[in-house]
Amino acid sequence: MKALLLAAGRGTRISRHINGKPKCTVRLDQKTTLIEYSIDLLRRKGIDDITIALGYQGDVIRKTLGEIGVKFVENPFYDVTNSIASLWFARDELKGAGHFIVMNGDVFLSEPAIDVVLAEKRSPILFYDVTRREEADYKFFCKGDRIVKYGKELSLQETSGEYVGCAIFADRFLATFVARLEELIRAQKHSMWWEDVLYSMSAECPILAKDIEGAFWGEVDFIEDYERIMAFYKDRKESPDANTETRLKVGGSRLPDARRVSGGKTT
């Protein structure tokens, strides 16, 4: 299995709280950044072929990681494109991968969460969290295991859960996926998110979704998200018991939707 971490975006919604640095370089503690944690997590699960898509302050990410043995691709147009362009620059890495995980670089997955993701053999499949409906940012509405609606504006009644920020593809699907990616780029759809490539194919093949079964995860979009992730990480290091996931999952919600700032992802 290969992995692609998309880390080209600027992260304007939290930028002032983290001194303008890339979201994936925020520290979980004095020794470990988010991107280092994610790489280590993937490697502990047997995934050594890891590519990182860079853009905003890519030199900072390279310096943070040093000689860590990952591959890099650059999206030089990160400031005028969205994550679909970062995926396009990494398209060659999608070939011949067997199973492939694509993950937004600002996402923190606990070990139970990555275990749920990597255990999944169906394709294409994205992951969501049914416990985060009211505070959800990007939402899925699912019927059975199929995504039928998606977006930030879904009502609570239409929300099955919050999108977790990663997907699994099988090799047999990747050629079709890359062909659609190329088609959208040629049509100048540079402002789309990478997930929109999948959504554009929903009439042709089912886009599946799976709940992460209560496992802890977080996304560094708002300062409250970051604080919640740090609290979880600190607690797990100090007392790695089974109760930490549930306690922090309930106690560390984001700001209510009414106080959010709208905007797209640019990873």
Image (cartoon, grey):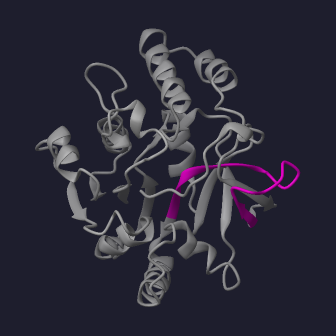
Residue 156 magenta-drawn? yes
Viewer-side residue, 47 vs 74: 74
Q: Position of residue 20 (x, y in %)?
A: 32, 39
Work out whether 155 lies above or below 227.
below
**50 left or right of 6 in image:** left
Task: Identify the image quadrant of the C terminus.
Answer: bottom left
Q: Which span is picked out in magenta?
A: 148-168
| Residue at 45% across, 54% down | 103
Q: Indicate whether 172 appears above or below 212.
A: below
Quadrant where the image shows the N terminus: bottom left
Q: Residue at x 36, y 67 (%)?
A: 86
User: Where is residue 42 drawn, in percent x and y?
Assistant: 36, 44
Residue 71 on image: x %, y %: 20, 58
Residue at 61 percent across and 51 percent down: it is: 262
Residue placed at 40% from the left, 39% from the top? 15
Does 205 lie within the magenta span?
no
Residue 41 seen: yes
Instruction: State the residue in front, 160 or 153.
Output: 153
Image-based side of 234 in relation to 59, left or right: right
| Residue found at the far right of this picture | 157
Q: Residue furthest top?
A: 238
Relative to 148, 5 lies left or right: left
Indicate the position of residue 142 as horizontal and vertical percent values: 78, 60
